Image: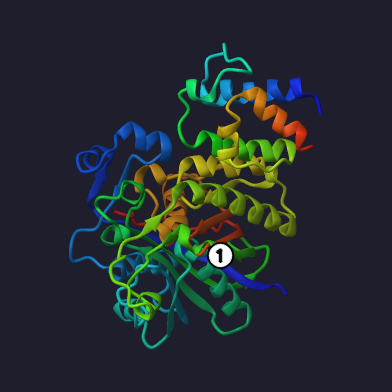
């Protein structure tokens, strides 16, 4: 799986679905994005649907940014 | 076997008192904006003192009987987790209040999933020839079981009742019930429960715990997964693809859960039936109340393919597939 494609997809989800500023970079910390407490839970569902990789909201929060989440997804094979 | 339950009437009842987010924000550390964005709820109904679950159930039941054009049934099944008493069940009291004579009547406890469990029992009774007509009611009055200082529950739950009359009929006619998927996971019962007031508290001589306790974040993930998996399995068995559905009515617990379930299933958001903004989470009443409101607003038409899916404490979940019947005019819920 292409990590750059995963990064682009997750960036698109955050920008389109959660109105995050388009200036979002793969390294922008999630904590700077003003996301509410349910977003990571929802993102986990969308990631499982798209890539077949099961992760918890806590794991996504701990990953901290889009680049690290993409690395987790590709490492886990999805 | 072609004999199955056919939906013949629907009724609903909610208390007249509207509780707004603004009112709750004067009592709890919350705001209208916080509640709306996290849950989709704008108002809910709470009963005035003196009203019981049985009262709401009776009112909804009467309206369902009127909608169906019948004044007798063979069986009454009431789904509730807030019964009038721990013992006996509330269904016999409701049956008596509705002047239904000495018909069989019993409660089902499956929390927010209760209505579909009761509906499956009714369908089974009809298919087995135990009954020709069944009144199924989902009713809960959670407002008196909420800790007034607990933001996680007080903003979510509302009181209400929804009811349906089912008659024996054939698969394929409008209103016919085509199938169910039911499931449970008691290993996660702590995610939504009332700790006290029953056998475990007595066995352990525990005191207190008379309020509903909810672990909302954990419930969110389980709810999305179970409702989407249950729905997908049922759709597969019934032979409907996501694009075949006219409507999907999910348990009205949280608008964002409903949107996630739709996204996983591949169902467009505009095909979701939603009334959580007006009534909050009404537990066992949720599915029939949402259907009732959709009939009243003209969304549902005879022959529409409807998927119902629900999830609640237990954990318990379930889904049902129905083709919508032709129904006469309805009495408003409030």
Q: Is residue B306 visible?
A: no
Q: What is the chain letter for disc 1? A: B
Q: Name the side, left or right, on which A1 lies relative to B172.
A: right
Is B37 rendered above or below residue B171?
A: above
Q: Quadrant of the N terminus of chain B?
A: bottom right
Q: Name the side, left or right, on which B215 lies relative to B152.
A: right
Observer-nearest residue: B254 or B150?
Answer: B150
Q: Is residue A37 visible?
A: yes
Q: Name the side, left or right, on which B289 lies relative to A70.
A: left
Question: For the residue carrying disc 1, how many other residues have a C-alpha within 10 Å: few (<14), some (14-19), or many (20+)?
Answer: few
Give the residue at x 47% y 41%.
B255
- Locate residue B272: give its quadrant: top right
Residue bearing the label numbered 1? B187
Give the residue at x 58% y 24%.
A14
Image location of residue A10, percent across then percent down: 65, 25
Q: Name the side, left or right, on which B165 lies relative to B221.
A: left
Give the residue at x 71% y 36%.
A50
């Amino acid at each position: 799986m292409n990590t750059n494609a995963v990064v682009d997809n997750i960036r698109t989800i955050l920008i389109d679905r959660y109105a995050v500023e388009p200036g979002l970079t793969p390294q922008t910390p999630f904590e700077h994005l003003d996301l509410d407490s349910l977003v990571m839970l929802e993102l986990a569902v969308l990631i499982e649907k798209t890539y077949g990789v099961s992760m918890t909201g806590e794991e996504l929060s701990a990953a901290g940014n889009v680049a690290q989440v993409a690395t987790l997804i590709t490492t886990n094979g999805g | 076997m072609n004999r199955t339950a056919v939906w013949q009437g629907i009724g609903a009842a909610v208390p007249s008192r509207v509780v707004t987010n603004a009112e709750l924000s004067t009592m709890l550390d919350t705001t209208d904006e916080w509640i709306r964005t996290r849950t989709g709820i704008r108002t809910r109904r709470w009963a005035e003192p003196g009203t019981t679950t049985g009262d709401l159930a009776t009112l909804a039941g009467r309206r369902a009987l009127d909608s169906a054009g019948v004044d007798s049934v063979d069986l009454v099944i009431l789904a509730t987790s807030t019964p009038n008493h721990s013992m006996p069940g509330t269904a016999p009291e409701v049956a008596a209040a509705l002047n239904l004579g000495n018909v069989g009547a019993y409660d089902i406890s499956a929390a927010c999933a209760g209505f579909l469990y009761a509906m499956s029992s009714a369908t089974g009774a009809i298919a087995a020839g135990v009954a020709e007509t069944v009144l199924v009611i989902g009713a809960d009055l959670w407002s008196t079981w909420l800790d007034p200082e607990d933001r996680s529950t007080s903003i979510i739950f509302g009181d209400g009742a929804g009811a349906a009359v089912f008659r024996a009929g054939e698969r394929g006619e409008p209103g016919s019930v085509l199938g169910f998927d039911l499931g449970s996971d008691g290993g996660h019962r702590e995610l939504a429960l009332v700790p006290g007031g029953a056998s475990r508290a007595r066995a352990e001589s525990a005191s207190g715990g008379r309020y509903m306790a909810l672990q909302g974040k954990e419930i969110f993930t389980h709810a999305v997964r179970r409702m989407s998996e249950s729905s997908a399995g049922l759709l597969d068995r019934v032979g409907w693809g996501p694009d075949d559905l006219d409507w999907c009515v999910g348990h009205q617990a949280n608008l964002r859960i409903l949107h996630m379930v739709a996204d996983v299933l591949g169902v467009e958001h505009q095909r979701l039936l939603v009334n959580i903004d007006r009534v909050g989470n009404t537990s066992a009443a949720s599915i029939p109340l949402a259907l009732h409101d959709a009939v009243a607003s003209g969304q549902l038409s005879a022959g529409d393919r409807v998927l119902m899916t629900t999830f609640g404490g237990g954990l318990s979940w379930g889904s049902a597939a129905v083709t919508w019947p032709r129904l006469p005019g309805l009495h408003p819920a409030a």
